[in-house]
Amino acid sequence: MQTSLDLLADAAAHRTSPHTYNDPHDLSHSPSLSPSCSPSPECQPRPLKRPNPGVTVRGAHQLRPRKKAHTSRKGSRLCVKPKAEFKVRRKELMERACRIQSLENSPVNEQQLFVLRTVYDEITMYPTEPWLVLMAIVLHRSLRQVKNWFSNQRQKNGAGDVVCTQTDLGERLRLRTSAIELCDRWSDSFFEEIIMVVNYRTKRRLQWERAQAMNKFTTTHF
């Protein structure tokens, strides 16, 4: 059986367009993020390596601050359009997430829990608000429920090792080392594709397991 780490690496290596899925609750009915904002070819996912037990990973507060890269005026002007497109896209997704209604105290199901745990254990304990919005839409849970789930997990498990990095637009991210090993430059579009593939494959796996269990029960009792 694949672990969440294996599934995440497999999803990144074989990720496909969100428009290939037919889940009524996924993002396939929304326009994908602008191609200009997608990860660059040199930032494609790398084979995921499991951390060496003999290597100690330092906490984010111990990492040396990175020097800010020099940005030319021309480059700054080119970033204006992608940033504007991102703002419009994020506003649309936020409005969509806010329309999701689910029972406040209803527990997550097995499929939703696996996706949330994969993100928490292998990608980030501190998802940005746009990433929380994406998870709320994909899992069809209210934004507040997704936020509370991550907050509760951090309280129960305490602080963990993170690596501070940035998106192409200069937004701060706090990622797990396993996420950095998977891809050194994350973006909203890359995260969107990853969680959609993980969610879809988890759904198919659970359907297969239920079918196998039903067949076994039928064979045994009839």
Image: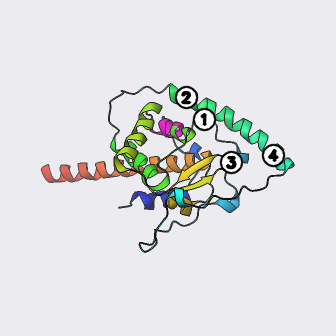
Give the crowd class for mark 2: few <14, some 14-19, many >=20 residues within 10 Å.
some
Which mark, residue 30?
1
Q: Tell me where residue 203 appears, x and y as whole percent.
A: 40, 46
Indicate whether residue 120 is drawn in magenta: no
In the picture, the quarter occupied by the N terminus is bottom left
N-terminal of the two: label 4 or label 3?
Answer: 4
Q: Which residue lies furthest to the right in this view?
A: 74
Image spot of residue 8 (x, y percent):
48, 57
Q: Is mark 1 on a helix, strand or loop?
A: loop
- Total labels: the figure holds 4
- Say whether disc 2 or disc 4 marks the residue closer to the N-terminus: 4
Q: Nearer the viewer, mark 3 or mark 1?
A: 3
Stretch of the chain drawn in magenta? 133-141
Residue 201 appears in the picture as rendered: no
The residue singled out by tag 2 in the image is: 96
Q: What residue does disc 3 label? A: 170
